[in-house]
């Protein structure tokens, strides 16, 4: 027990000032992530929220060492994983697994589910050929899929079933960190509820940390210990999941106002954020959110607001933080 | 009645196995301009049902029982020629990510113009003018500029609006939408919900929307159909289903919807 308490305290992953730029046509540069920092502790869930195209997937891929950052470091147990090469780099994947946003694209269509699920185990020599079937069946059971799906191909399944195969695959190696890119968006809420319970149970038992990209703010508020809100590659706000309603960044508040509810009365009050997200090729000087912000001032067009801690653990990048909605 | 589906059964052929129906006994109907939301269990056959209505089940999939008729035509016996006339014209579909349906190396405009010209005799400049007009309907800023863009240059929400613009070009009687907002953040989702409301309530297009977002389903639809285990477990007026669910499955589904301020999974 004391062991567990200790384990849930340690920072195992540090994202330090990560910037990722991509070359764009015509010699331009596209900034997908800009100076992003946060820590992930063992046994903790950090959710990343933000508009599509704001750089969430790019950030996870950097964290997974799929591509190097343009600037900044990713420290896993104090070691910069972006510098790893060869065998060390390969070994690192054993401890950090990812559930990709689009399993259809991530899976080899010619592989059967058994082989897809057991692939990470095979890569590290952790499963014998004659154990695969049984291992795959056990993992399928965990994510509530029929065991005889081991013989299927990914295209013979529904979207939500494929998504659960991706989760089962990430669980196979019992990694320390699982990075989930919209991993439950294709599930019905009742299966989602049980998958989240499963993830939480594994987290409590094994101290797994989740970095969880998710559009469902309600789910985030119930599942995440901490939330990072991004816009146009920049961190706008960092806040505890339980306190999401206390958010005071105008963008976070716009997100909160857009959530559909089962209360049909509340849906009358959904408000749509006007305008479009600017091109990441052409990020405005000053605050990235200025073109859509209802309370922008002069200074917002000149000076970029840095992240400031306005309450313990609550950071906001805004010249004009707002009173909480609730 | 625009669409009449009764006791529909759909099966996927499986190698070396007797085909077992995946979808059983699905019955519902749709009037002109009416909106139906299908919600329910993952793997219960929602996508299967709407793909059957578009005549594009994956290889091996087939309607094996019951009947489905659209605007007086029997869809089970409709020859491929008949489908070609319906699809993209009277019935059209939008997907989870319209971007993935687009060719990455051709401009949006090129693809849109080509799509228009396969369905209707018109010159390139007529087609271009029509495309620009439809894009503007979807509140896309500078449609001319969009026409010259590639799919990867647009945000997910913009791509989805292009997808809707294309789908409604020929003023279809029925729009099918399979999880059209699952890949989108909440602000973009609210924007797309606004465009879909314009298409259904403003233009009078009937729609079947499949979604896991029960709140969204309730906000957009007249009626809700709940599926589980390959069957319909509940079907009724949206407000009625939301406020007085009858089936145990529906009750547990509604109880699982996460709401801000609800019970947390973690401390
Ligand atoms: N091409 C196929 N061949 C065989 N079985 C299939 C095929 N496509 C889907 N299935 C099966 O048919 C059932 C219904 O699938 P469908 O895609 O219609 O589900 P769905 O309700 O849309 O689920 P989700 O909410 O996860 O998208 C599932 O059990 C799935 O495994
Ligand atoms: N490999 C790449 N090359 C060039 N641009 C990219 C690449 N991957 C992502 N981008 C761009 O970076 C930005 C952020 O994308 P992404 O990380 O996928 O956002 P999100 O996951 O938040 O939707 C987008 O403008 C996207 O077009
Ligand atoms: S810094 Fe200015 S523009 Fe940016 S969110 Fe705050 S008030 Fe709005
Ligand atoms: Mg992404
Ligand atoms: Mg589906």
Image (tube, rainbow, N blue to C red):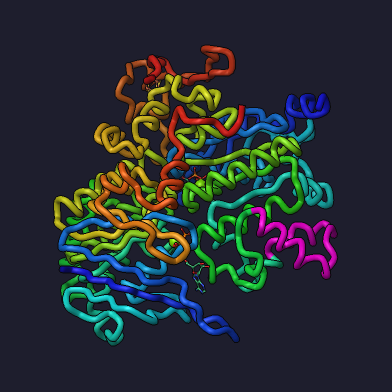
What percent of the width, then of the height, locates residue A194? 57, 46
Rendered location of residue A303, percent (x, y): 43, 19
Find residue B265 and report its image quarter: top right
In the image, A6 versus A249, the foreground residue is A6
Q: Is residue B70 left or right of residue A176?
A: left
Mark count: 0
Looking at the image, residue B151 sits to the left or right of residue A86; the answer is: left
User: Which residue shows up at 49% across the image and 33% down it?
Assistant: A230
- Picture quadrant where residue B228 is located: bottom left
Q: Is residue A154 magenta?
A: no
Kindly identify the residue that appears in the image at 15 percent across and 63 percent down. B32
| Rendered view: B95 above or below A95 | below
Q: Main secondary structure of the magenta part?
A: helix
Asked whether the viewer can see residue B140, the reply is no
Residue B16 drawn at (x, y percent): 60, 86
Q: Residue at x 70, y 29 (%)?
A: A41
Please state which of residues A296 and B12 is positioned toward the viewer in this rendering: B12
Quarter placement of the N terminus of chain B: bottom left
In the image, is residue B26 above or below residue A206? below
- Residue range corresponding to the magenta coloring: A116-142
A214 and A218: which one is in front? Answer: A218
Front residue of this view, candidates A219 and A27: A219
- State which image quarter holds ligand 5: bottom left
Quarter occupied by the C terminus of chain B: top right
Image-based side of B232 in relation to A45, left or right: left
């Amino acid at each position: 027990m004391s062991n567990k308490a200790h384990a849930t305290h340690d920072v195992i992953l540090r994202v330090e000032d990560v910037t990722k730029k991509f070359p764009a046509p015509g010699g331009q540069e596209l900034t997908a992530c800009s100076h992003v920092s946060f820590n992930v502790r063992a046994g903790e869930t950090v959710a990343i929220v933000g508009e599509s195209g704001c750089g969430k997937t790019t950030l996870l891929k950097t964290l997974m060492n799929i591509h190097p950052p343009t600037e900044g470091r990713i420290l896993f147990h104090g070691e910069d994983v972006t510098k790893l090469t060869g065998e060390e780099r390969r070994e690192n994947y054993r401890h950090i697994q990812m559930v990709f946003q689009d399993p259809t694209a991530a899976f080899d269509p010619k592989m059967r589910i058994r082989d897809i699920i057991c692939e990470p185990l095979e890569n590290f020599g952790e499963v014998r050929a004659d154990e695969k079937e049984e291992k795959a069946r056990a993992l399928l059971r965990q994510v509530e899929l029929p065991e005889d799906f081991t013989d299927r191909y990914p295209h013979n399944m529904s979207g939500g079933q494929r998504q659960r195969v991706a989760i089962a695959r990430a669980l196979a190696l019992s990694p320390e960190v699982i990075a989930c890119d919209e991993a439950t968006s294709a599930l019905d809420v009742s299966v989602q509820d049980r998958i989240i319970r499963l993830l939480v149970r594994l987290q409590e038992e094994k101290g797994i940390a989740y970095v969880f990209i998710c559009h469902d703010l309600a789910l985030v508020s119930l599942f995440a210990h901490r939330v990072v809100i991004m816009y146009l590659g920049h961190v706008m706000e960092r806040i505890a999941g339980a306190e999401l309603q206390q958010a005071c960044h105008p963008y976070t508040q716009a997100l909160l106002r857009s959530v559909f509810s089962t209360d049909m009365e509340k849906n009358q009050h959904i408000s749509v954020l006007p305008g479009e997200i600017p091109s990441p090729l052409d990020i405005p000087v000053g605050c990235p959110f200025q073109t859509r912000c209802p309370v922008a001032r002069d200074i917002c067009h000149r000076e970029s607001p840095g992240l400031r801690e306005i309450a313990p653990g609550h950071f906001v990048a805004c010249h004009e933080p707002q009173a909480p909605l609730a | 009645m625009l669409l009449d589906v009764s006791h529909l059964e759909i099966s996927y052929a499986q190698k070396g196995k007797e085909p077992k129906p995946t979808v059983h006994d699905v019955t519902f109907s749709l009037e002109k301009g009416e909106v139906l939301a299908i919600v329910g269990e993952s793997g219960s056959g929602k996508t299967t049902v709407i793909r059957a209505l578009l005549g594009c089940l994956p290889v091996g999939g087939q309607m094996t029982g019951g009947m489905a008729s659209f605007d007086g035509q029997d869809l089970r016996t409709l020859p491929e020629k008949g489908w070609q006339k319906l699809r993209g014209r009277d019935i059209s579909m939008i997907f989870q990510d319209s971007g993935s349906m687009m060719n990455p190396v051709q401009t949006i405009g090129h693809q849109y113009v080509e799509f228009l010209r396969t369905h209707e005799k018109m010159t390139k400049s007529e087609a271009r003018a029509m495309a620009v007009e439809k894009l503007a309907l979807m509140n896309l800023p500078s449609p001319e500029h969009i026409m010259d863009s590639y799919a990867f240059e647009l945000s997910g929400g913009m791509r989805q609006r292009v997808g809707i613009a294309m789908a409604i070009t020929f003023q279809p009687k029925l729009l099918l939408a399979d999880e059209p907002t699952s890949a989108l953040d909440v602000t973009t989702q609210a924007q797309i919900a606004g465009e879909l409301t314009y298409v259904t309530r403003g233009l009078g297009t009937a729609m079947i929307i499949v979604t896991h977002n029960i709140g969204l389903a309730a906000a957009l639809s007249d009626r809700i159909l709940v599926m589980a285990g390959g069957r319909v477990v509940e079907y009724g007026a949206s407000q009625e289903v939301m406020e007085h669910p009858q089936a145990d499955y529906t009750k547990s589904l509604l109880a699982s919807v996460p709401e801000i301020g609800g019970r947390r999974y973690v401390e």
